[in-house]
């Protein structure tokens, strides 16, 4: 397991609700084993429920009741999210550092709660082999896979088999389990005599990027320079896939068209390398949703949880399905 640093220094700017940085220049921040310092203000790890990042942005989900600094509270978005634009350090390194410590406190809090209820023996946790976060598995059935909600890695206890969440996770935009990468969507435009360009960053799976590629290509077609970034998106989406999951994007593409039988053949090949992988079962389940077979979707989501009892993405899809069913006109007329 890799050694982790005992302190990280960085510079940052707060990000507001509109996604814009606040202020003209960055200020100092640091992480130590004891606390987070943001321009001299202290944020305790006990206040952090989750940490994630996208490119240079670090996003912390916070319990505001455990924040004593009014300056930090002032910058909370919707009262519970702190977004920081990071420079002079990698946001990902900060995310890993914070999750390693805050997850330990979260698990300890749960252990104390269980002990107070006389259920101390039900406490069970493991350390994620990829990011070192503490994964709380208390009160859950023991299953072949474990999901680290901090880095989205899916692993097997005491075994090497895993899909690393930095690369293989749910797509930000379509919600399917696939290879996900960051892309710069780049547009040239022409206003009478002024040329310009605009761009934005998106994190997309190999399927979603294909749709964006065609859009970027078509919009930029008359501007020769804009065509190269479009083709780079396409090339990037085809390169560097894990050998054993090379055909996952193809299975998902068929699934998104509701071609479940054809997609099933490819998922079956993928299961030879990753038997009953909860993320693959989730995507396969979503393909049946596209194919209008909700029962099969539900059954595959149950399989996903039987394979990985803490796989939160499967639980979220099941909750959404239950909501949709309870709000459907047919269920209302029955009630
Ligand atoms: Zn992890
Ligand atoms: Zn996608």
Image (spheres, grey):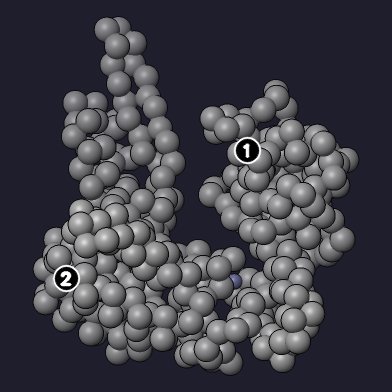
Q: Which one is nearer the viewer's eye here, 97 or 257?
A: 257
Residue 4 point in image, percent of width and height? 75, 69
Res. 214 mark: none
Name of the residue lying farthest toward the top: 193
Q: Is residue 10 above or below residue 180?
A: above
Q: Which residue is mark 1?
A: 77
Horizontal side of residue 290 vs 155, given as left or right = left
Q: Is residue 185 above or below residue 94?
A: above
Mark 1, other Cα within 10 Å: few <14 / some 14–19 / many ≥20: some
Q: Which one is nearer the viewer's eye here, 41 or 65?
A: 65
Horizontal side of residue 141 vs 315, given as left or right = right
Q: Is residue 1 above or below residue 44?
A: below
SS at circle 1: loop
Quarter of image, res 220: top left
Residue 231 point in image, percent of width and height? 27, 45
Displayed-image quarter of ligand 1: bottom right
Q: Which one is nearer the viewer's eye here, 251 or 327?
A: 327
Residue 131 point in image, percent of width and height? 63, 71
The residue at 42%/80% (across/down) is 305
Q: Nearer the viewer, mark 1 or mark 2?
A: 2
The residue at 40%/32% (across/down) is 199
Q: Which residue is mark 2?
A: 293
The residue at 38%/74% (across/down) is 279
Q: CA distance from mark 1 to mark 2?
A: 39 Å
Label 2 lies in ligand 2 vicinity (Cβ under 8 Å) = no
Tally the numbered discs.
2
Residue 110 point in image, percent of width and height? 72, 74
Q: Earlier in the sequence, mark 1 or mark 2?
A: 1
């Amino acid at each position: 397991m890799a050694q982790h640093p005992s302190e990280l220094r960085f510079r940052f700017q707060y990000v507001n609700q509109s996604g814009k940085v606040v202020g003209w220049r960055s200020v100092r921040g640091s992480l130590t084993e004891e606390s987070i310092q943001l321009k001299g203000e202290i944020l305790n790890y006990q206040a952090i429920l989750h940490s994630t990042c996208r490119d240079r942005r670090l996003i912390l989900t916070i319990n505001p009741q455990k924040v004593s600094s009014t300056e930090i509270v002032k910058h909370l978005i919707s009262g519970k999210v702190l977004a920081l634009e990071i420079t002079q350090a990698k946001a990902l390194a900060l995310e890993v550092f914070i999750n390693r410590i805050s997850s330990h406190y979260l698990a300890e809090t749960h252990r104390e709660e269980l002990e107070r209820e006389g259920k101390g023996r039900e406490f069970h946790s493991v350390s994620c082999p990829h990011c070192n976060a503490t994964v709380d598995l208390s009160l859950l059935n023991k299953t072949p896979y474990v999901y680290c909600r901090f880095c989205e890695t899916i692993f097997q206890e005491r075994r090497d088999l895993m899909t690393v969440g930095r690369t293989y996770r749910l797509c930000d935009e379509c919600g399917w389990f696939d290879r996900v990468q960051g892309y710069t969507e780049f547009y040239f435009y022409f206003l009478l005599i002024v040329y310009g360009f605009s761009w934005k960053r998106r994190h997309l799976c190999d399927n979603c990027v294909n749709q964006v590629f065609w859009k970027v290509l078509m919009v930029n077609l008359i501007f020769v320079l804009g065509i190269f970034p479009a083709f780079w998106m396409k090339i990037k989406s085809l390169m560097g896939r894990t050998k054993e999951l090379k055909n996952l994007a193809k299975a998902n593409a068929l699934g998104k068209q509701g071609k479940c039988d054809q997609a099933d053949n490819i998922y079956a090949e993928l299961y030879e390398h990753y038997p009953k992988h909860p993320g693959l079962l989730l995507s396969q389940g979503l393909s049946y949703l596209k194919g209008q077979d909700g029962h099969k979707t539900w059954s595959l989501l149950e399989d996903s949880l039987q394979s990985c009892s803490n796989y939160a993405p499967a639980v979220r899809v099941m909750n959404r399905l239950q909501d949709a069913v309870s709000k459907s006109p047919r269920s209302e007329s029955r009630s």
